[in-house]
Amino acid sequence: MSPVFPTVREVLALDPVRHGAPRLVAGDAGLDAPVRWVHVAEVPDIATLLGGGELVLTTGIGLPADDAGLRAFIGDLADVGVSGLVVELGRRYVSGVPRVMAAAAERRGLPLVELRRATPFVRITEAVHALIVDAQLTELRATEEIHQRFTELSVEGAGPAEVVRQAAELAGCPVVLENLSRQVLAYDAAGESAELLLDGWEQHSRRIRPAGRTAYDSDSGWLVTTVGARGQDWGRLLLRWPGGGELAGGATAGGRAAGAPPTRLTILVERAASTLALGRLIRRDAEGLERQIHRTLLTALLDHSRPVDEVALRARALGVTLERRHLVGVVVRHRLDDPAAEGASGESGLSADAAPEAGPARLRDLAEAVGQALREAKLTGLSSAVDDQAVGALLALPDAAGEERALTAFATALRRIRLDAAPARAAVAGGVGPDAVIVAAGSGVGGLREARRSLIEARQIADAARRDRRDLPIFRLPHVGLAGLLHLLRDEPRVQTFVERELGALLAHDARHPRDQLLGTLRAYLEQGRNKSAAAAAAHLSRPAFYERLARIARILDVDLDSVEACLSLHVALLALDAIRTP
């Protein structure tokens, strides 16, 4: 029965009742039973006309005269679930109700109250019914606000964190969203200590076992509802009601557990769960909730949008401990940015119609592969897409000694997973083909406050290694050398000025003559160490044709291509141009 109704204790405190000088003679254990209605009765078989939850008022003039009849009368009222019995003294009973009636009421936990002064029953019924109606109106308004709030959240496509925050705000109680593995996806402590709320969460959550899809666990004090849709449950939403747990006490005569939350909170958690389930369905082609939380935390580390301590707390609640760990930032990305564009030009076998979906789908597949590789390598960490082209991971290792071993295990697992998922990738999974990936790792750090440096370094290494032709399982800072330095300096105006000074004339020529591009010829010549025969073969040109193109490049740039110093300058300019053009 809903706690929106006043209790027997609250009714006894009303002025019209107090006017009658009430005295509780039995059944004090049932004083917290809710009063659904007030009924005046003067017949002994009134129980057959009641539905439970009523407070019965009587003068006793119609009650049985024998002890057995009084016991049966009390028993019938208790069986039907009335909240209490109020007897006005003076007409049938002068000094007090019969002892047998009091004893029977005490045995059944039914509150029995004497009114020692004459009191118009109509005033009592009016007062109680007004209290009930006011409470119901308040509950209705609260329910309307709940429905309106969560409807707006559904329309806005609010994320789990916002839904949980709004639920906690409306309830004024802590709210936790967890997955089926009892890992915290989102929470709001409602002003309480988040540390205490989430400490040992998984073990605590497994002890919360409500009976039903939405139910209140009086032992723990948590109101719980299952989150899911279309027969696929994926989590639970839990609200801690302060009247529960050890403070809840036992069951009342009305059949309701003492301290149970009001109906509006049940409606609240169910509406919040529906909003979460709907949002999940809408985002069913996007990342899972766990991966979204991983992305939120990695993004927070990269852009300082959340305090480091909060990131550590939320990660620990998700099952990833970052404190007192050796942390290594890792970035995995494809060598080519836009397979859709390649497909449109016919180089990768993708149709132009598939272009809009190809990029996000490829990135999602890569993120899933990275997460699976972490699991297979038995590594702990956060992982998710960090931008439109790359997947980041922050590995949390027990100590620095195992860094190389962990990175090797991760890279090996990732390569195997990608080959198993698509055998056609076998020729390019670790090489330089259109589907090849780069695994880059930053320097290991000893604390979470330095993790951003490791992640940024890994991203810079991955970007700088895109044109590296070596098939390395993991790229580290020493591997990218000059290209890595130029990538770091790519936004420097002096570097851009240097590129224009060295290559501007050749770039202008290529812009005017799109069918006679010469920059690729220069690149082949420099990458082959100024070996003209090898460069001609790499460019798929005959030697006379290649030599003629080199001569034109020398005239356009007004440079001696046999000069080591001049070629070194041009090669650096080419590397800088690649860094500038790399998004």
Image: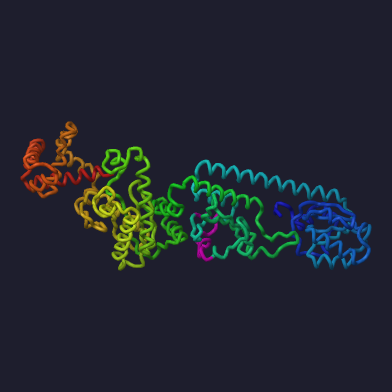
Q: Residue at x 36, y 48 (%)?
A: 363
- Provide the residue span drawn in magenta: 186-203
The reply, left or right, for residue 290 in relation to residue 487 is right
Pick the front one: 316 or 391: 391
Left or right: where does residue 505 sit relative to residue 305? left
In this view, 316 is above or below 509? below
Residue 104 % position (x, y): 84, 66
Residue 309 found in image quarter: bottom left
Q: In the picture, which quadrant includes the N terminus? A: bottom right
Residue furthest toward the top?
512
Q: Quadrant of residue 239?
A: bottom right
Task: Identify the residue at image location x=92%, y=63%.
Answer: 95
In the displayed structure, does residue 513 sit left or right of residue 95? Answer: left
Residue at coordinates 14% horizontally, 40% vertically from top-left? 502
How far across and how far down the image is residue 83, in percent? 78, 58
Tell me the residue at 19%/33% (across/down): 514
